Image (cartoon, rainbow, N blue to C red):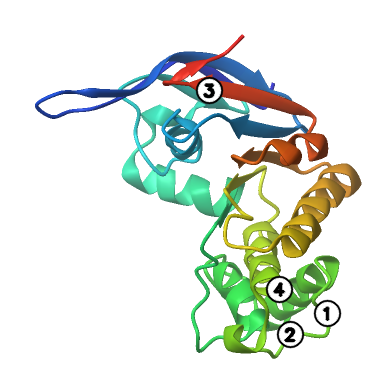
């Protein structure tokens, strides 16, 4: 297993505590494309955020490649996210003044490699997602689907161990959504990319290897 989740719990404190995740246990194999599905409020995004080191659980373990990442320091978390994890969200989070190429090579600039290498890597990744002819385009010059593909290229350019996608097609029309999901499937099959995706669309089930269903913070058997 590339990911092992053990007794994971997340409680948001308040006058009435909210138990968002309740003793969650599961594993993900290397190269799997897994969907987290369930109704709104079921705990899908909360779970993704614990796995991706974007939040800290109340209790439990998230073991990636044999290491319990929950025990990491703040700096260790930051380093691990940069080197091992990629993220795609429903908002593309592209800076309006940066071209597609600049958006994608931005994470590589933090990796202490020379300019020629990071430009080459970013160009190749944009070509891989079908945007080889859009390198110098700004976000306003691209469709929503194209902007999301830039975000995917940015997430993959550091060769992450795991790609996390949180409702990646929520802001797209049906045709653009299909393009993005087929791209995920292709990346999964062609390069063995491990992908964990949150979605609320039942039709998305046909693209993935396995669905983990959540209800009220509990995995449904």
Image marks 1 and 2: residues in contact by CB distance under 8 Å: yes
Proximity of marks 3 and 4: CB atoms separated by less than 8 Å = no
> What residue is pinned by disc 2?
135
Q: Residue at x 70, y 67 (%)?
A: 149
In primary-sequence order, the first of circles 1 and 3 is 1
Would you identify the image quadrant in which residue 205 lies? top right
Q: Dot 4, how many residues are within 10 Å of its Cα: few (below 14), some (14-19), or many (20+)? A: many
Q: Is residue 66 visible?
A: no
How much space separates mark 1 and mark 3, taking CA atoms?
38 Å
- Residue located 13% across and 29% down the image: 14
Question: Of marks 2 and 3, which one's residue comes earlier in the chain?
Answer: 2
Front of the two marks 1 and 3: 3
Mark pair 3, 4: CA separation: 31 Å
Horizontal arrangement in the rendering, residue 7 relative to residue 153 (left or right): left
Q: Residues within 10 Å of mark 3 (few under 14, many from 20)?
A: many
Up-down relation of residue 29 to residue 185 (above or below): above
Q: Are marks 4 and 1 in contact (CB under 8 Å)?
A: no
* Residue occupying image coordinates x 73% and y 85%: 135
Q: Is residue 75 above or below residue 66?
A: below
CA gap, disc 4 and disc 1:
11 Å
Label 1's element?
Answer: loop
Sequence-earlier tag: 4 or 2 = 2
Q: Which residue position is annotated with label 3?
A: 214
Residue 99 percent coordinates (x, y):
62, 86
Q: Is residue 156 left or right of residue 108?
A: right
Please report whichever mark, 4 or 1, sits nearer to the chain's N-terminal start: 1
What residue does disc 4 label?
A: 146
The nearer-to-camera label among 4 and 2 is 4
C-alpha separation, residue under disc 4 versus residue under disc 2:
11 Å
Whether tag 1 and tag 3 are in contact, CB under 8 A, the answer is no
Residue 45 placement (x, y as % from top left): 47, 38
């Amino acid at each position: 297993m590339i990911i092992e989740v053990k007794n994971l719990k997340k409680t948001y404190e308040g006058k009435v505590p909210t138990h968002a995740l309740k003793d969650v246990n599961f594993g993900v194999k290397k190269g799997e494309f897994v969907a987290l599905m369930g109704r709104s409020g079921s705990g899908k995004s909360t779970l993704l955020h614990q796995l991706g080191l974007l939040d800290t659980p109340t209790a439990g373990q998230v073991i990636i490649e044999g290491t319990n990442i929950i025990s990491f320091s703040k700096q260790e978390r930051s380093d691990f996210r940069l080197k091992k994890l990629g993220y795609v969200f429903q908002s593309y989070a592209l800076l309006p003044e940066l071209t597609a190429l600049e958006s994608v090579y931005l994470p590589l600039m933090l990796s202490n490699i020379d300019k020629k290498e990071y430009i080459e890597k970013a160009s190749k990744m944009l070509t891989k997602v079908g945007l080889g002819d859009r390198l110098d385009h700004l976000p306003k010059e691209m469709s929503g689907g194209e902007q999301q593909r830039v975000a995917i290229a940015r997430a993959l350019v550091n060769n992450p161990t795991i790609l996390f996608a949180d409702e990646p097609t929520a802001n797209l029309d049906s045709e653009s959504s299909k393009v993005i999901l087929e791209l995920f499937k292709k990346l999964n099959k062609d390069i063995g990319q491990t992908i964990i995706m949150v979605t609320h669309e039942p039709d998305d089930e046909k693209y993935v290897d396995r669905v983990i269903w959540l209800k009220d913070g509990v995995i449904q058997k």
